[in-house]
Image (cartoon, rainbow, N blue to C red):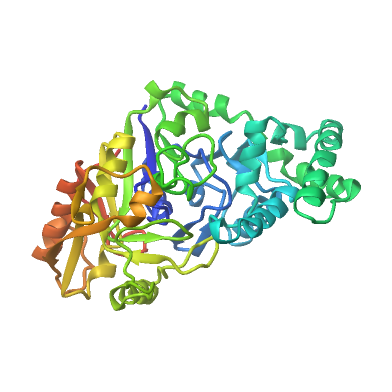
């Protein structure tokens, strides 16, 4: 009964959805365990391109059970839109279930998210403004509303009557905003609860039943390890509780750590980041202007159908060379048993490539991956230059058929990350994947 955790090894946007969709073929249950609709997974199927924000990427297989775990915060309107969009495109959601313990994003969360970013001014984090951070803050502060509350009108009314005056005081007195009307919020969200009630289950029990039957479970991470609240580039991180690392997977799904048998990390063949915060290998000059190599990566990605723009926000991603210091750090942090490299084909047109193998500050080497974002912002990458292959890899399906320079690049990443590469993707389509060694 293997339990496989799939995590992001960088700052998110690594192509986890594409890999989960691939791995779901060999699983019975696919479950999302963290974050909210601030994360997005793009999946290409025979029915077209889908952008998922809450629903697990296993949804495109009718025989898979898809679970949204207790570690996820849910905007009911977004989830309903996603369900309706899937159904209208011929994708069944009859096997989709949502944890009764999952927290609900309320309208005041979205307002507070935006107003707080405005209040921070130059110190703004660069959130997606979807209300995810404030919802997790309420979870920790024990003033959250859970799905179990939302689907019971009398319980929801009681909870909202206690919480909304408190939140309205925040909105009006701290931020100078408008108060929310109780009846309007209650009626709107009660309707959401009524429509979502058929999907709400004890997902902990469902996943344990699957494990008792000896079935394979894939736990789908959202966001990236470098956005983790504890281990990431704090304060430019996600507010997700539990952790967005593999350590949070069991908590976010309600299973013990000893049930997890494998952990794989997804890494792009280069680096990207959306939002604020330091990124040592970002391809910009001293004035912050984007360098031609970054534009080449972004444009090549767009040409190939990826588009280096956030699936949730639409914001252009900051692009840079592969950062092996950060990659090795997240590999150790998550105890990876394998690495999955995505978007190798985006680099097909480069004559030469660079890999960051270390940092220095004022000429002095830096040990490990700094905890301080102030220090990380001062880090200058130490690069190793390697030859490119200048050949199309999108049609390659066997590792040995890749150009020699592409093979060498992957093997070099493997040695620097510190764990074996299991899959290399060379395009967004389901069959554009090179299986180097089995994952499940």
On the image, which quarter does residue 336 sit in? top left
Q: Extreme left residue here? A: 404
Residue 394 seen in this snapshot: no
Residue at 17 percent of width and 60 percent of height: 383
On the image, which quarter does residue 202 sit in? top right
Please state which of residues 142 and 259 is positioned toward the viewer in this rendering. Answer: 142
User: Residue 184: horizontal and vertical position, in percent?
Assistant: 88, 51
Please state which of residues 84 and 279 is positioned toward the viewer in this rendering. Answer: 279
Residue at 81 percent of width and 49 percent of height: 173
Horizontal side, residue 61 vs residue 394: left or right: right
Give the total number of marks visible in the rendering. 0
Horizontal side, residue 275 vs residue 82: left or right: left
Q: Extreme front residue here? A: 362
User: Residue 2: horizontal and vertical position, in percent?
Assistant: 35, 30
Looking at the rendered image, the quarter that the N terminus falls into is top left
Looking at the rendered image, the quarter that the C terminus falls into is top left
Q: Extreme right residue here? A: 183
On the image, which quarter does residue 134 sit in? top right
Q: Is residue 310 above or below residue 219?
A: below
Horizontal side, residue 147 vs residue 266: left or right: right
Q: Is residue 282 above or below residue 125?
A: below
Residue at 37 percent of width and 55 percent of height: 14
Q: Is residue 313 above or below residue 298?
A: above
User: Residue 361: horizontal and vertical position, in percent?
Assistant: 25, 54
Residue 52 seen in this snapshot: yes
Please state which of residues 294 and 424 is positioned toward the viewer in this rendering. Answer: 294
Please state which of residues 368 and 372 is positioned toward the viewer in this rendering. Answer: 372
User: Residue 190: horizontal and vertical position, in percent?
Assistant: 82, 43
Residue at 29 percent of width and 34 percent of height: 335
């Amino acid at each position: 009964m293997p339990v496989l955790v799939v995590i992001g090894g960088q700052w998110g946007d690594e192509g986890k959805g594409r890999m989960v969709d691939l791995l779901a073929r060999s699983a019975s249950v696919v479950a999302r365990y963290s974050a909210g609709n601030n994360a997005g997974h793009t999946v290409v199927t025979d029915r077209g391109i889908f952008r998922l924000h809450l629903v697990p990427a296993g949804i495109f297989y009718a025989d898979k059970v898809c679970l949204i775990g207790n570690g996820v915060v849910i905007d009911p309107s977004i989830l309903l839109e996603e369900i309706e969009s899937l159904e209208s495109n011929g994708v069944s959601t009859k096997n989709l279930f949502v944890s009764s313990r999952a927290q609900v994003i309320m309208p005041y969360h979205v307002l507070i998210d935006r107003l707080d970013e405005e209040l921070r001014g130059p110190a703004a984090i660069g959130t997606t403004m979807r209300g995810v951070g404030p919802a997790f803050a309420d979870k920790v502060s024990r003033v959250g509303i859970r799905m179990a509350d939302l689907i019971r009108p009398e319980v929801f009314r009681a909870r909202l009557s206690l919480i909304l005056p408190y939140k309205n005081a925040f909105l009006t007195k701290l931020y100078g905003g408008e108060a929310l009307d109780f009846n309007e919020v209650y009626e709107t969200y009660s309707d959401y609860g009524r429509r979502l009630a058929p999907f709400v289950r004890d997902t902990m029990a469902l996943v344990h039943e699957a494990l008792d039957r000896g079935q394979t479970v894939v736990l789908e991470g959202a966001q990236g390890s470098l956005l983790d609240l504890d281990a990431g580039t704090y304060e430019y991180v996600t507010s997700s509780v539990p952790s967005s690392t593999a350590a949070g997977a069991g908590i976010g799904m309600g299973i013990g750590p000893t049930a997890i048998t494998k952990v794989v990390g997804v890494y792009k063949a280069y680096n990207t980041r959306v939002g604020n915060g330091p990124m040592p290998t970002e391809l910009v000059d001293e004035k912050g202007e984007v360098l031609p190599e970054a534009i080449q990566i972004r444009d090549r990605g767009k040409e190939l159908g990826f588009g280096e723009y956030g699936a949730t926000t639409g914001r252009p991603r900051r692009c840079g060379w592969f950062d092996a210091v950060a990659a090795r750090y997240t590999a150790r942090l998550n105890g990876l048993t394998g690495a999955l490299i995505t978007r190798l084909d985006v680099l097909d047109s480069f004559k030469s490539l660079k890999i960051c193998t270390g940092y220095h500050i004022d000429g002095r080497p830096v040990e490990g991956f700094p905890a301080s974002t102030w220090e990380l912002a001062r880090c200058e990458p130490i690069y190793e230059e390697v030859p490119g292959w200048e050949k199309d890899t999108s049609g390659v399906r066997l590792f040995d058929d890749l150009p020699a320079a592409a093979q060498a690049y992957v093997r070099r990443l493997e040695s620097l990350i510190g764990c074996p590469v299991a899959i290399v993707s060379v395009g967004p389509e389901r069959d554009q994947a090179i299986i180097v060694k089995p994952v499940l």
